[in-house]
Image (tube, rainbow, N blue to C red):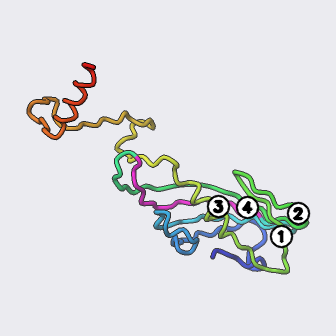
C-alpha cells in the first residue's frame, strides 16, 4: 500500500522517490520485478496534485519466439485531490479525486498499480526483432531446403492418399 498523511506533506512543491516491490501493489504475477516511483507533490490550500513518473523492470515473454527478455517500462500519471470536488473522474492522463482532510490519508496504490499494468505492451516483442523502432519480418526455417535429404516416410501415406483423390 502506498499512502501518505495529508498533514505531513509540506505546502508547496515537494518530491519523493519510492523503491517498491511488485507485491506492494499486488502485481506479483505480472512480470514486474522492481519499481521506482518519482512523485512530485504540489499542495495548496484546497488541493493536492501528485505527478507520478514510474520506471519498472519487467521480465516478459516474447509473443513471437517465446523467449524471455528483460526490459524497462516507463509511464507517467497525475492524481489531483480537490476539496469540494463533486465527481471523481478518471482519464487516460490523470484522475480527479475528492479530498477529505479529516481522513488525513492519501492512498495512491490503485493509481500506481494501474499505471504500471497499462505500461506493459499488449504485443511483447523481443528486442532482437525490433530495428530502428520497427518490427522486423519474422523469418522461420523448418529444416533444409533439400527435401530428398530430409525425407520423412511418415508422410508417404498421406501423399499417396492425396494423389488418389486428385485422380478421381
Which residue is rendered at x = 14% and y = 30% of the image? 147
Quadrant placement of the C terminus:
top left
**What number is the disc on residue 52?**
3
Judging from the image, what secondary structure is the residue with disc 1 in?
loop
- Looking at the picture, does residue 10 appear above or below residue 158? below
Q: Position of residue 104 (x, y in %)?
A: 79, 80
Judge from the rendering whether residue 52 lies leftward or rightward of residue 166; answer left or right. right
Where residue 130 appears, as percent x and y from the top left, is 40, 40
Q: Earlier in the sequence, mark 2 or mark 1?
A: 2
Determine crowd level at label 1: few under 14, some 14-19, many 20+ residues with C-alpha closer than 10 A.
Answer: many
Image quarter in which the N terminus is found: bottom right
**Local SS, label 2:** loop
Q: Is residue 132 above or below residue 78?
A: above
The image quadrant that residue 161 belongs to is top left
Q: Is residue 128 above or below residue 23?
A: above
Residue drawn at 53 percent across, 66 percent down: 36
Q: Is residue 112 magenta?
A: no
Mark 2 and mark 4: Cα distance apart in space:
13 Å
CA separation, marks 1 and 3?
18 Å
Tell me where residue 54 sits by quadrant.
bottom right
Q: Disc 2 designates what residue?
A: 85
Kindly indicate whether the residue at mark 1 contacts the one at mark 2 (C-beta within 8 angstroms): yes
Q: Range of the magenta residues? A: 49-63
Q: Which residue, given by chain and number where applicable, does mark 4 sit on?
A: 79
- Say whether disc 4 or disc 1 marks the residue closer to the N-terminus: 4
CA distance separating discs 2 and 3: 21 Å
Q: Earlier in the sequence, mark 2 or mark 4?
A: 4
Helix, strand or loop status at disc 4 = strand
Residue ranking furthest to the front:
168
Whichever of callouts 1 and 3 sits on the residue coming sooner in the sequence is 3
Amino acid at each position: 500500500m502506498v499512502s501518505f498523511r495529508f498533514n505531513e506533506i509540506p505546502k508547496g512543491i515537494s518530491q519523493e522517490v519510492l523503491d517498491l516491490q511488485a507485491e506492494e501493489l499486488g502485481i506479483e504475477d505480472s512480470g514486474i520485478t522492481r519499481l521506482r516511483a518519482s512523485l512530485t507533490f504540489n499542495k495548496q490550500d484546497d488541493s493536492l496534485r501528485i505527478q507520478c513518473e514510474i520506471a519498472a523492470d519487467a521480465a516478459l515473454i516474447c509473443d513471437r519466439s517465446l523467449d524471455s527478455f528483460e526490459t524497462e517500462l516507463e509511464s507517467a500519471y497525475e492524481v489531483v485531490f480537490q476539496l469540494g470536488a463533486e465527481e471523481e473522474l478518471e482519464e487516460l492522463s490523470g484522475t480527479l479525486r475528492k479530498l477529505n482532510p479529516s481522513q488525513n490519508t492519501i492512498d495512491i496504490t490503485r493509481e500506481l498499480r494501474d499505471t504500471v499494468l497499462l505500461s506493459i505492451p499488449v504485443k511483447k516483442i523481443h528486442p532482437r526483432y525490433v530495428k530502428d523502432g520497427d518490427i522486423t519480418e519474422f523469418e522461420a526455417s523448418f529444416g533444409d531446403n533439400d527435401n530428398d535429404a530430409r525425407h520423412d516416410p511418415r508422410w508417404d501415406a498421406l501423399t499417396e492418399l492425396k494423389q488418389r483423390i486428385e485422380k478421381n
